[in-house]
Image (tube, rainbow, N blue to C red):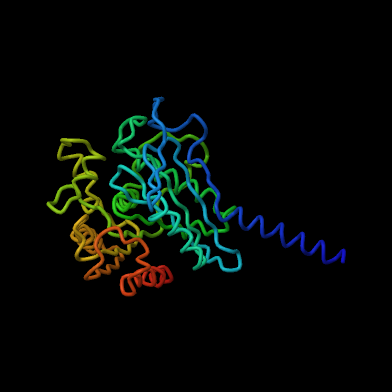
């Protein structure tokens, strides 16, 4: 009986630790050391109407979902939810994705990044990149703790989150903030990128005007537009990339993915593109569409292949 009691206690302790590891929220920055932040009376807003929408982010975080150790591949994916740079579709394109990745042994890490539409930020166009660089550095600094390989850390972005992710993937070496601690000594380069119906360009007619206005303002100069048109920023150092898009997407036209795919090809970067004839915009995991939901299997197949 005593042996059974201690065995049960050990199981419950391990189970509790496993559950705790499944959902851990970590601030991106040391307290009172958040770059490009000013004190205001603005409050972070969480609204749920089918989807959890977060706006006016005040404290950027990562929310970490770790797979069972017995199933862990050592891979991690940082997830950037979309929302036009106005809100974050935090569960639909964030925590739901992280939990789904866990089923395949992949650590899913949701980035709650600051938005340029907040009045608590300065140099608004740089803030998503600042938080993105810090997020991947923070995860890499905790690779041992999270049981992940520091050379298998990728990023995934949906819609405007795809713009945030592709900006990180093309501007990872750009110095946009002063180092705060030892975390900032780690590389901000992702090892791979998955971009799902992403916003990419701000210079072509197929641009998403809402995201551009939110990030760059009402009348940005052409240099700033080009700087954040990520098809123009691809180099041979850009990480290998998977692109997923629907041809009938009227929110963010498929040309965004086509432009980025061609730019990757022209620079000799490994790129994979899947275009579905139907699906529209914002389909996330597409659980109710037996054809479209196959994109997740394409993702896992692609992640299993390493150049």
Residue 243 sits in quarter: bottom left
Give the side of residue 225 with respect to residue 64, left or right.
left
Please identify the quadrant where the N terminus is shown: bottom right
Q: From the viewer's side, name the closer residue of 40 and 231.
A: 40
Q: From the viewer's side, name the closer residue of 181 and 260.
A: 260
Q: Is residue 254 above or below residue 112?
A: below
Task: Name the residue rendered at 79%, 64% in the picture.
Answer: 7
Please identify the quadrant where the C terminus is shown: bottom left
Give the side of residue 200 with respect to residue 293, left or right.
left
Residue 143, image x, y percentages: 54, 53
Q: Is residue 212 above or below residue 118?
A: below
Residue 45, image x, y percentages: 40, 38
Is residue 307 visible from the viewing direction of this image?
no
Is residue 232 visible from the viewing direction of this image?
yes
Give the side of residue 265 with respect to residue 290, left or right.
left
Residue 38, image x, y percentages: 39, 26
Residue 214 sits in quarter: top left
């Amino acid at each position: 009986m005593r042996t059974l009691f201690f065995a049960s206690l050990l199981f419950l302790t391990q189970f509790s630790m496993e559950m705790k590891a499944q959902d851990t929220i970590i601030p991106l920055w040391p307290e009172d050391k958040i770059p490009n932040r000013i004190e205001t009376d603005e409050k972070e807003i969480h609204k749920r109407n089918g989807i959890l929408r977060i706006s006016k982010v005040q404290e950027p975080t990562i929310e970490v979902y770790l797979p069972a150790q017995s199933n862990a591949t050592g891979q991690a994916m940082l997830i950037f939810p979309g929302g036009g740079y106005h809100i974050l579709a935090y569960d639909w394109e964030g925590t739901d994705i992280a939990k789904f990745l866990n089923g395949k042994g992949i650590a899913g890490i949701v980035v709650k990044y600051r938005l340029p539409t907040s009045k608590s930020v300065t140099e608004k166009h740089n803030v998503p990149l600042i938080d993105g660089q810090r997020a991947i550095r923070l995860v890499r600094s905790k690779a041992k703790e999270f049981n992940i390989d520091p050379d298998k850390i990728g990023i995934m972005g949906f819609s405007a989150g795809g713009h945030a992710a592709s900006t990180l993937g093309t501007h990872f070496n750009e110095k946009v903030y002063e180092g705060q601690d030892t975390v900032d000594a780690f590389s901000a380069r992702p090892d791979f990128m998955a971009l799902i119906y992403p916003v990419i360009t701000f210079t072509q007619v197929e641009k998403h005007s809402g995201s551009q206005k939110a990030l760059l303002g009402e009348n940005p100069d052409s240099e700033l537009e080009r700087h954040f048109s990520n098809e123009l920023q691809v180099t041979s150092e850009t990480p290998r990339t998977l692109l997923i898009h629907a041809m009938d997407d009227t929110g963010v036209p498929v040309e965004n993915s086509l432009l980025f795919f061609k730019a990757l090809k022209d620079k000799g970067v490994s790129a994979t593109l899947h275009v579905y004839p139907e699906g529209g915009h914002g389909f996330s995991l597409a659980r109710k569409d037996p054809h479209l939901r196959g994109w997740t299997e394409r993702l896992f197949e692609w992640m299993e292949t390493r150049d």
